[in-house]
Image (cartoon, rainbow, N blue to C red):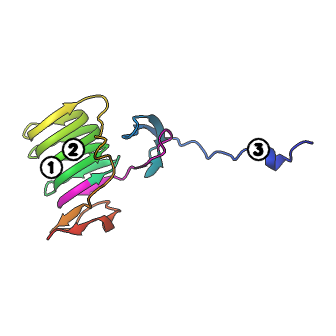
Amino acid sequence: MPLRPALAAFHPKGPKPKAVRTVSCPHCSASFDISQKAMSVRCPQCTRPLAFEDLHLDAKMQGDVSTMGTVHLGESGEMVGRLICGQLQSTGRVDGKVVVYGRAELHPHSLATGQLNARAMLAHHGATVRMAVKIGPKPMVSTVTGAVMTRPVQRAGRRIVGGMTNAERFKPVG
């Protein structure tokens, strides 16, 4: 007996995105293509969720930040803690452990202390780098700490400017 036409067809796939980018999972290092507009996706290999939000930090922050998007650290911005991101562009201060799966760019008058593990690094003339730097093809997060947030990020004093969509994670210091 032949199947009915509705039951014989598989679920149709959505349209293919026109602009794609290749990303790699920080957990299992699998590479795959996603849309340029994607904000979050699950890794097809390990099925863990990945967030691709771009963050603009123009205040003092303490804690952990984890995103596979671009983190812009403004001139008055200061990040203390662990930062895991896809790309970093800093004109402010960063102190702690930084894992960048793309390029870390330190602009003039920026200060970086702690540890940096990145695929590529660009330090402009005038940037101060006091970090243990490791440049390699696949930066990895240690298995003990993982790439998930373990402590909430805390904001001190001024408000955050830019695309902070997870404002409920931030608590004032003190």
Distance of label 1 from label 3 (alpha carbons): 53 Å
Query: Residue at left 64%, top 45%?
Result: 13
Residue type at numbered disc 2 = Val
Inspect the magenta stretch and tell me whether residue 51 lies in it: yes
Work out whether residue 162 can be spotted.
yes
Q: Position of residue 98 (x, y in %)?
A: 21, 44
> Mark 3 — residue?
9
Query: Residue at left 11%, top 46%?
Result: 110
Residue type at numbered disc 1 = Val
Residue type at numbered disc 3 = Ala
Name the image quarter holding the N terminus: top right
> Mark 1 — residue?
94
Q: Earlier in the sequence, mark 2 or mark 3?
A: 3
Q: Is residue 13 left or right of residue 163?
A: right
Q: Position of residue 6 (x, y in %)?
A: 80, 49
Where are the magenta residues, as a range? 43-64
